[in-house]
Amino acid sequence: MSADQPGFLRRHAGRFIGSAVLTVCVIWAARHSGLELLPSWSRFSHVKWWTVGVYLLMVATWTYFRAVRWRFLLRKAAPDVKKPRLLAVSLVGFAAILILPFRLGEFVRPAMLREKGKVSFSAATGSIVAERIVDGVYLSVVLVIALLVVPTIHPLPEHVVGLPITVAQTRWYAWVTAGGFITGLVVLMVFYFARDFAKRVTLAVFGIVSKKLAAKLADEFEKLAHGLDFFGNARVAFGFFIETSAYWMINGASMWLLAWGCGLEHANGSAPTFGEGCAIMGMLGMAILIPGPPGMLGVFQAGLMCGMTMYYPEEIVRDRGAVYACVMFLVQVVWILGSGAVAMFSGHTSLKALAAEDQKVGPD
């Protein structure tokens, strides 16, 4: 590093300061809204602790599938990148997403692959965008099915437990978000399968406002559409779908197990169902799309509360639901940071690449 080049902490100073301020604001808001982030230790007495250990193993399993399925999206841009490197880069990237606010850590994975010339930054970024959209569509479909077929408590409460928002608003947000992801996927698919037509439409529509803006948008959409290259090979597309399904289904099953282990139950004393676990997973997934502080602190717990309020009595959500949210959050934070730290020093990635993450990338 040259003498006049700012160090990592200096380059990220604004982000870390903003992150600290946002975290303080979230904690203050949680305390004044009734959203309990850290229940008293006495309320953990009913937790079946062996389920926490199994939950951790399941988190490690779905994290593996979440990481290595990336190879399907990079099959043309980086066909020679091996699973160990993809896993290591992904684990470091997941830790960066947790540490940095507003999901700025999403840029770490493309930057770390590009650092050794394995793949261009734009191609890797396109694959990340495609991954996010496909995940959003997949999770949206799971959530929509759950909202339609999984029985809720009746009548539904007016407000989400511990939050100044209504249950109707959260359900509306879920439907709108699902529509947004599906629209995004359709746009990228049009650019991938009918590129000339998509460019003409973009230039015609946005050219009314600004021809320069229209050309820029068409160019960016075209680059991002390359992330859908896996659609060009049925075997690759099927492999990506299978591993994505494994990722989300194990995730839902892990949330179901932990809900039972933390003592969540219905008014009649019956145990949580797998369908409820998927619905809560969907609400959590929709919530953390909202830009937030490191670890999605507050946003994470709010998403779980939105889901639990639809299926369990208020007294259960306030008591055992708060414990459930706390245990899940802590286990995931410990796992993500711990696995990211191990991956950083595994020999498959480097601190240099992470430090260069926020520098401007030149032409590929």
Image (cartoon, rainbow, N blue to C red):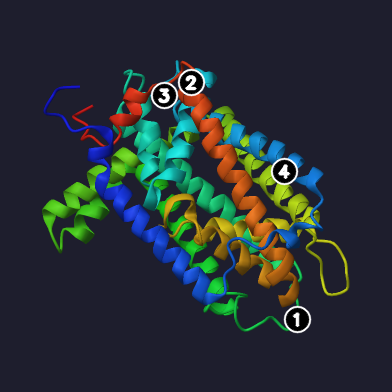
Say which label, 3 or 2, has the lower sequence index.
3
Who comes first in sequence, dot 4 or dot 2?
Answer: 4
Q: CA separation, marks 4 and 2?
A: 25 Å
Quadrant of res 304: bottom right
Label 1 Cα crowd, 10 Å radius (few <14 / some 14-19 / many 20+) = few
Residue 37 appears at what percent x and percent y?
58, 62
Q: Which mark is residue 76?
A: 3
Q: Is residue 231 above or below residue 281?
A: above
Of circles 1 and 3, the one toward us is 1
Amino acid type at image mark 3: Lys
Across and down, in percent, residue 17 comes to: 30, 52
Q: Earlier in the sequence, mark 1 or mark 2?
A: 2
Q: Which mark is residue 135?
A: none
Specify the amino acid type for callout 2. Answer: Arg
Q: Which residue is mark 1?
A: 154
Distance, label 1 to label 4, CA atoms, is 30 Å
Q: CA distance from mark 1 to mark 3?
A: 51 Å
Circle 2 residue? 85
- Image quadrant where one finds the C terminus: top left
Mark 3 to mark 2 CA distance (whole Å)? 17 Å
